[in-house]
Image (spheres, helix red, strand yellow):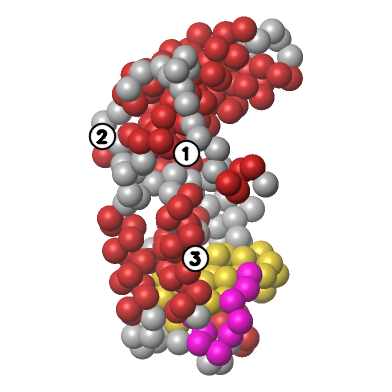
Amino acid sequence: MDSPNRPDPVAAAQDLVLARFPRAEQAWLGGSVVLGGATPMSDLDVTVLDPTATAHRESLRHLGWPVELFVHTEASIRHFVGRDLTDRKPTMARLVARGVPLLPGDGGTEVRRYCDDVLQAGPTPLPASALASARYALSDLVDDLQGAGAGPERTAIAVETWRRTAELVLDVNGCWHGGGKWLVRELIAFDVAAETTWTASLDAGLASALAGDTVLLEQAAEECLALAGGRLWEGFHQAASIDQCR
């Protein structure tokens, strides 16, 4: 969101990249100022492709703007895209593929195309074992929610039930996850595409639960579980990995 006391976000991001990264092949401005939903507190998410740099992130201010700076080589971008795939959260791919190019020329075209392909393909299907774990966790939370008395424990259970339900809705429909506001944005995007009302239902359910009535949130979680194969608690079995035993 622009302010009379600072330049246009694209101009500010370009100025930063040109001043600090003379060898950059390309840079992209992403985040809310580009994709929508910017607030007076929004920062500039700037990803720099510089083959001479050491990959790092840095928080700073430039021309009045708070900036989250992500400096990468092509190899490090591909590495972090791959790591994000494990979490089903395409943070790195989105920064590059959906960002506004800040430098002239066609630098970074190949890695940008790779990131776009990853976004378009969506996450890989959730493994059966992971789906079972998600069903088990949400089933257990609903039971806890039903039995919780008023107080901070119920608040924590309600918030976690909301999050787990949102993630499971996205999982069973082959959609990306997100963290914080990006989880909500992914859920909204799914609702728009599928003409469903999960975002509104979960928001109303959480608000009601925090006010003392958990019925709506329980109902939303149960509807989600039905889509995923139903409740799962008794008979659930999960082998521990060697790493978990260390």
Which mark is nearer the camera, 2 or 3?
A: 3
Pointer 2 residue: 194
The image position of residue 229, as x and y in percent, is 32, 22
Q: Sequence-wise, which precedes: disc 2 or disc 3?
A: 3
Quadrant location of the N terminus?
Answer: bottom right
Residue reaching furthest bottom?
23
| Circle 1/circle 2 CB separation < 8 Å | no
Which residue is depicted at the point 41% across and 36% down? 129
Magenta part of the chain: 49-57
In which quarter of the view is residue 192 placed?
A: top left
Residue of label 1? 184
Q: Which mark is residue 162?
A: none
Q: Is residue 24 left or right of residue 211?
A: left
Q: Secondary structure at mark 3?
A: helix
Q: Position of residue 69 (x, y in %)?
A: 60, 70
**Three-letter code for the amino acid on which mark 3 is drawn:** Phe
Q: Which of the two discs, 3 and 1, labels the residue nearer the N terminus?
A: 3
